[in-house]
Amino acid sequence: MRKVLMIIGGIVVGFIVLFVAIFIITSATSKKLVCESDEGKIIIMYNDKTITGYTSNGVSYDLEGQKAYAEQIGVEAYIEEFSKLFSSKSTGNCKVE
């Protein structure tokens, strides 16, 4: 029984390490749009072709829907549009890093 728990624990730890590694690689290789306001903060990670991920605190975001929209209109146009929308709907602003 103890061996089974150790194996399951190892698998869980492995998945956690894999998730963290993927997140770090995505963060390091992507451009970032950082938007901050009193309501919360969102960081959208992207490359020349698509949205690659995001992190958020207090701001909701539909990754799959926004990713499809960004691919439809172009990522640079999407980033500009999102920045303007965020600034007009909140007390904050966005910057590209």
Image (cartoon, rainbow, N blue to C red):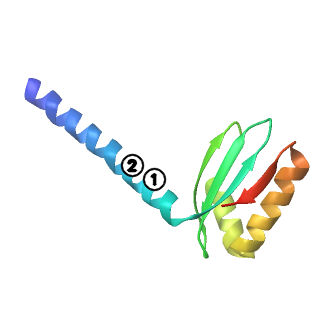
Q: Position of residue 1 (x, y in %)?
A: 9, 23
Q: What residue did someone put label 1 on?
A: 23
Image-based side of 6 in relation to 86, left or right: left
Q: Classify mark 1: residues with Cα within 10 Å, few (<14), some (14-19) or many (20+).
A: some
Image-based side of 85 in relation to 78, left or right: right
The quarter of the image holding the C terminus is bottom right
At 59% from the left edge and 70% from the top edge, which residue is drawn?
47
| Nearer-the-camera pick, 69 or 44 | 44
At 39% from the left edge and 49% from the top edge, which residue is drawn?
19
Q: Secondary structure at mark 1?
A: helix
In the rendered image, is residue 1 in sight?
no
Mark 2 near mark 1, Cβ–Cβ under 8 Å?
A: yes
Q: Classify mark 2: residues with Cα within 10 Å, few (<14), some (14-19) or many (20+).
A: few
Q: Position of residue 52 (x, y in %)?
A: 56, 62
Q: CA distance from mark 2 to mark 1?
A: 6 Å
**In which quarter of the view is residue 2 placed?**
top left
At 80% from the left edge and 58% from the top edge, which residue is drawn?
83
Q: Is 68 rendered above or below residue 36?
A: below
Q: Secondary structure at mark 2?
A: helix
Image-based side of 80 in relation to 29, left or right: right
Q: Amino acid at mark 1?
A: Phe
Q: Is 48 rendered above or below residue 39?
A: below
Q: What residue did someone put label 2 on?
A: 19
Q: Amino acid at mark 2?
A: Phe
| Nearer-the-camera pick, 29 or 88 | 29
